[in-house]
Image (cartoon, coloured by chain):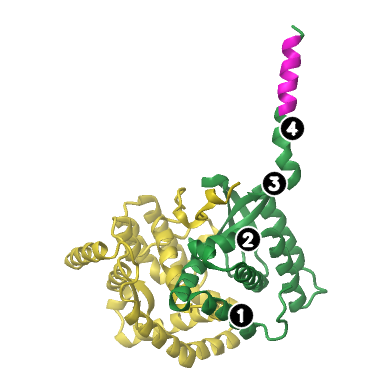
């Protein structure tokens, strides 16, 4: 683990140097992977998720979502420790214990009802917190949008998925499939609208992904200063 | 003894006039604008007499009033705005306004049982103000939505919506820059026209 992390950090530092100006030096390759993923989604995942959404009531889908959120809590815990957040880490422990027992293996989010907050962490965010830039944007086959940093983060996430060491590979694969379909089912309308309203869906996803990830690395605290996004060029010259 | 109070009264009177002049024109501060907008939207969503198309139309109308499409268009095109002819600028503005309003209407229409909670305001550069809100309840529970407003002739208007860190303005800006770099303004305007035809075959006129 430690070796992997250190190697990841080295690679990230290298990647970060090369990409200060453009976040997407591998655009050609990424676009290819992106459209491959889109075709798979339209041919397989979206239809399956549509059926899933049609068959299962929303309450059941929420429970399934709770179950997978709970399975992820140990990873959140590890990352809260790596980011030196003892309060958050103790909340994660409380949440996991309560939801696994009183919440019947995680299907019911009892913890939220009794006021234990849900934290959002993963290894990609931890690397970001440690000062690693995201590096170039990277679209992973079947897994979707990522960055060099977050791709390494995913490796860390799967390595610390504890139950994976105790169950046969097929079980992990099955669970991952159910999770994927269930998440996709919750996004049916959202993604349909985004596809229809964007002039370039690839750019839409890239921009939204990168901004959202940095937002989460900063724990949803918005920096007060902004870039030139809100500045009209030649504004002064326009004034009489 | 008498002069000083009179001077103070005059100063207070002046300060009041100066303070209220823009406020009178706009009547509401940034948070109040967002509150009113959210309440107006909820009223439309809860109006059982309206069908989906009518609901969306009403919400689009609300967006028309609250967004500063002129400023958004300039910001979203950056330096390319100046490269457009006046006729192209007008067309871009019309198409983009239609796109954003439709988008807003469709999106809000999906949020049924949600409630908008205003968390606070933050002063930004150039006199802008960001109103921080959170959606509570429903599928979008805990979603963080920030509205950036800029004052125009005394009225606070929305110039950006930032959902969980992802800025609408920034997103369209990068998309437009991409399309522009591929084929210039003609291609951009063509793509915008085609998109509208693709989504809304029935009503082609944006007004």
What residue sits 59% from the left and 50% below the top? B119
Q: Nearer the viewer, mark 2 or mark 3?
A: 2
In the rendered image, the quadrant that contains the N terminus of chain B is top right
What is the drawing colour of chain B?
A: green
* Separation of marks 4 and 3 at Cα, in angstroms: 14 Å
* Separation of marks 2 and 3 at Cα, in angstroms: 16 Å
**Can you see residue A14?**
yes
Few, some or many residues within 10 Å of mark 2 (<14, 14–19, 20+): some
Residue bearing mark 3: B154
Colour-to-chain, yellow: A
Secondary structure, mark 3, is loop
Q: Residue furthest top?
A: B1
Residue bearing mark 2: B70
* Separation of marks 4 and 2 at Cα, in angstroms: 29 Å
Marks 1 and 4, the one that precedes in the sequence: 4
* Separation of marks 1 and 4 at Cα, in angstroms: 47 Å
Q: Nearer the viewer, mark 1 or mark 4?
A: 1
Residue bearing mark 1: B193
Marks 1 and 2, the one that precedes in the sequence: 2
């Amino acid at each position: 683990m430690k070796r992997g992390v250190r190697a990841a950090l080295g690679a990230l530092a290298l990647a970060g140097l090369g990409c200060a100006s453009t976040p997407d030096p591998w655009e050609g390759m990424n676009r290819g992977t992106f459209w491959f993923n889109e075709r798979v989604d339209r041919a397989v995942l979206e239809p399956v998720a549509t059926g899933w959404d049609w068959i299962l009531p929303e309450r059941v889908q929420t429970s399934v979502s709770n179950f997978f959120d709970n399975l992820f809590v140990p990873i959140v815990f590890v990352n809260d420790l790596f980011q030196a957040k003892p309060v958050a880490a103790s909340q994660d422990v409380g949440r996991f214990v309560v939801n696994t027992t009183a919440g019947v293996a995680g299907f019911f989010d009892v913890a939220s009802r009794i006021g234990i907050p849900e934290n959002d962490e993963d290894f990609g965010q931890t690397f970001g917190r440690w000062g690693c830039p995201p590096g170039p944007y990277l679209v992973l086959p079947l897994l979707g949008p990522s960055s060099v940093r977050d791709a390494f983060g995913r490796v860390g996430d799967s390595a610390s998925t504890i139950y994976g060491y105790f169950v046969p590979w097929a079980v992990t694969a099955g669970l991952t499939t159910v999770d994927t379909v269930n998440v996709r089912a919750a996004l049916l309308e959202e993604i349909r609208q985004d596809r229809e309203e964007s002039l370039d869906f690839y750019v839409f996803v890239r921009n939204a992904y990168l901004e959202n990830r940095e937002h989460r690395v900063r724990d949803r605290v918005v920096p007060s200063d902004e870039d030139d996004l809100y500045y009209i060029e030649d504004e002064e010259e326009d004034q009489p | 003894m008498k002069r000083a109070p009179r001077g103070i009264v005059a100063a207070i009177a002046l300060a009041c006039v100066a303070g209220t002049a823009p406020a009178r024109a706009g009547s509401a501060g940034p948070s109040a604008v967002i509150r009113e907008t959210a309440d107006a939207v909820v009223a439309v969503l809860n109006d059982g007499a309206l069908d989906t198309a009518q609901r969306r139309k009403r919400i689009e109308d609300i967006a028309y009033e609250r967004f500063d499409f002129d400023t958004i268009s300039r910001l979203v095109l950056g330096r390319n705005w100046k490269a457009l002819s006046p006729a192209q600028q007008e067309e871009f503005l019309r198409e983009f306004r239609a796109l954003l309003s439709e988008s807003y209407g469709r999106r809000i229409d999906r949020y049924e049982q949600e409630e908008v909670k205003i968390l606070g305001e933050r002063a930004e550069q150039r006199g802008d103000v960001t109103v921080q809100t959170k959606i509570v309840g429903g599928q979008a529970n805990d979603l963080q939505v920030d509205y950036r407003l800029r004052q125009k002739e005394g009225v606070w208007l929305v110039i950006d919506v930032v959902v969980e860190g992802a800025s609408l303005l920034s997103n369209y800006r990068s998309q437009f820059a991409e399309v522009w770099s591929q084929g210039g303004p003609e291609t951009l305007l063509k793509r915008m026209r085609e998109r509208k035809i693709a989504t809304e075959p029935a009503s082609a006129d944006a007004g």
